[in-house]
Every structure is written in C-alpha cells, then in structure tokens.
Image: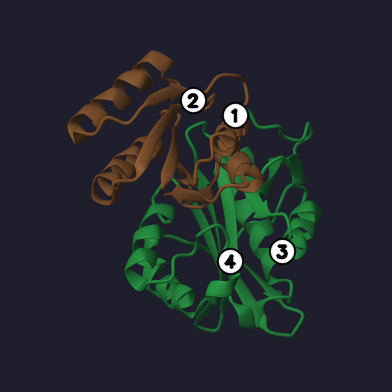
Amino acid sequence: MKILLGVGGSELSYQALTETLERVSETGDELTVAVFENGDIDADLETVQQRIQEQIDESGLEPPIRHVEGTSPGSELVNIAESEEFDRIVLGGGGRSPLGKIQLGPIVEFVLLNAQTPVTLIR
Amino acid sequence: MTRTYPDEPAEEFPQPPRTITDRKDRPIDVIPADDADTESLVEMYLDFDPADRAQGIPPVKEEAIREWLETILDGDCVNVVAKHDDTVAGHATLVPDNEDEHELAIFVLQAYQGAGIGTALVETLLGHGQAEGIDHVWLTVERWNDPAISLYEKVGFEISSAESFEIEMAIRL
C-alpha cells in the first residue's frame, strides 16, 4: 500500500509519524512523508524537518521526504495523493480544548472533507 | 488565536444559589460546585446517554470521567450544578484557557432536558463567572445542534466563527 503521511509540526503530527513508522516497519507499506507548514505551529520549517529526520533515523527506515508547497497544505496533500495514486493519507490531529473537547484543525478538516483517498486520522 | 467577541458586555446574570421551577414543575436548585461534588457528578455522568456526548466529552468509562472531572473541578474553574432533590440533573462549567478567557460547557441528563434547566444553568454559571471577575467566555457547538445554539443565542452569545466543523460562539461579560 502507498501511504502519504502529512506532518506539520504539531505534537500530534509527530506522534502520528512515530506510529506510522512502527506500523510500516511491520507491514512493509510504501511510505512517503510530506512536510507542510502549519500556520498554527510556532516552530519554523527547518526545526520541523530536523525533528522528522531524527525520528526517521531512529526508525531505521528510509522513506522519501518531500515538501508540500503553497499556502493551502490540505489541498496540496489531497492533490498529491490523487495525482500520484496513493492508497491512503495519514494525519495526526484532534487536539483537546481546555475543557477536553476534541478539535480538528483546518488542515485536517480540509483533508477529511475533500480527499477522494481514504484518510486515517491518528489522535 | 484571536477570537471575536460582541462589542457590548452582556447583562448581569443571576448568581447561585437560586431555585427555579422547571417546565415539569420540579423544583431545581442551581448551586456552585467544586471538587467536593465529585461523587455526585460521577453518578450523573455514569447515567449520561453516550449519544448526547459532544466532541468526545463527557467520557464514558468511570475512570476517564474521574480524570476529566479532576481537570474541570480544579480551583481556577467555575462550576454550577442543577439539583432535583439529591439528584444532580445538570452541570455547567467554565474552564480557563491560556489567554485568560474561559471555555463553557453544559450537560443536562436526558430525563431533565427540554425543561428550561439548561438555560437556568448557563445563566447562573455566567452570573457566578461575573462575580469571579471572568469577562470573556467562548464555546463550541456542533452545527446541527439547533436547540443548543438557540439557547446560547438567547442568553447573549454571538457566533464568532462558523468556518469549522463546530460553530464557535462568544460572549463578553
């Protein structure tokens, strides 16, 4: 299976990376990591990339890493998945409000609503 | 995150304790609550119909309910409960976020819904919040939940964002 994992630098996106790397090392799925800029995250792209690289190095896997360009990462993720025939998009998300309500950010929401590809949300 | 609040502050809301008669003629006491009320609230949430959950709360299992209550009954939160005799029929809470604004949520047991208890709870919670110096309150509500949205609008909340799965509403106290 061809998997497109989007990572934008939120804690939940790193968690999704960890879980996906573990899963892929068991299943042998073909993983691509797509780094995007999440406007809700303070860290700059370089820091995000570095942390992703560290996590990947630890896993011993060598998935290709690519950049999601443009101002609408959700839309671009959906495009990549469709045009390059990925079987699944994986995203981390669903943080909690102060009161404990689950909240989806705009990027996750866009992908869930617009993807023609099955989407796995890891939360 | 910048949230849009109504320009004008809301009216002054009633403060707890108060007793109302609901639309089914039941006397309902609306009183402040804190962590001393944990056990009666656990009981209420164990009785809560999971189909009435919103965005993952309240949790279903007792252990998770207790953990959640510990957060929202913390000293810097504001809580009121609606009691019918010894039964906790409803609960409303204000929980601070990082911007010194407060998130509101309210839960009413199925057997007590549609009787005006929710409105009394929200109004009294906001009155309690005013007395505690709270001035910015927001909430999220699922866009299909018309009864809740009209309740919040009636009390004075205005929609601050409708771009997401949930509608966000805010009130200035």
Check the residue under mark 2 and report the chain it is in.
A
Compared to B172, does B48 lie above or below? below
Q: Which residue, given by chain and number where applicable, does mark 4 sit on? A: B107
| Residue B47 percent location from the top left of the image | 49, 80
Same chain, labels 3 and 1: no
The mark closer to the camera, 1 or 2, is 1
The colour with which the image depicts chain A is brown
Contact between marks 1 and 2 (CB within 8 A): the answer is yes
Amino acid type assigned to the residue bearing label 2 in the image? Phe
Q: Nearer the viewer, residue B104 or A78?
A: A78
Q: Which mark is residue B120?
A: none
Q: According to the colouring, which chain is green?
A: B
Check the residue under mark 3 and report the chain it is in.
B
- Residue A44 visible in the shown view: no
Q: CA distance from mark 1 to mark 2?
A: 9 Å
Amino acid type assigned to the residue bearing label 4 in the image? Phe
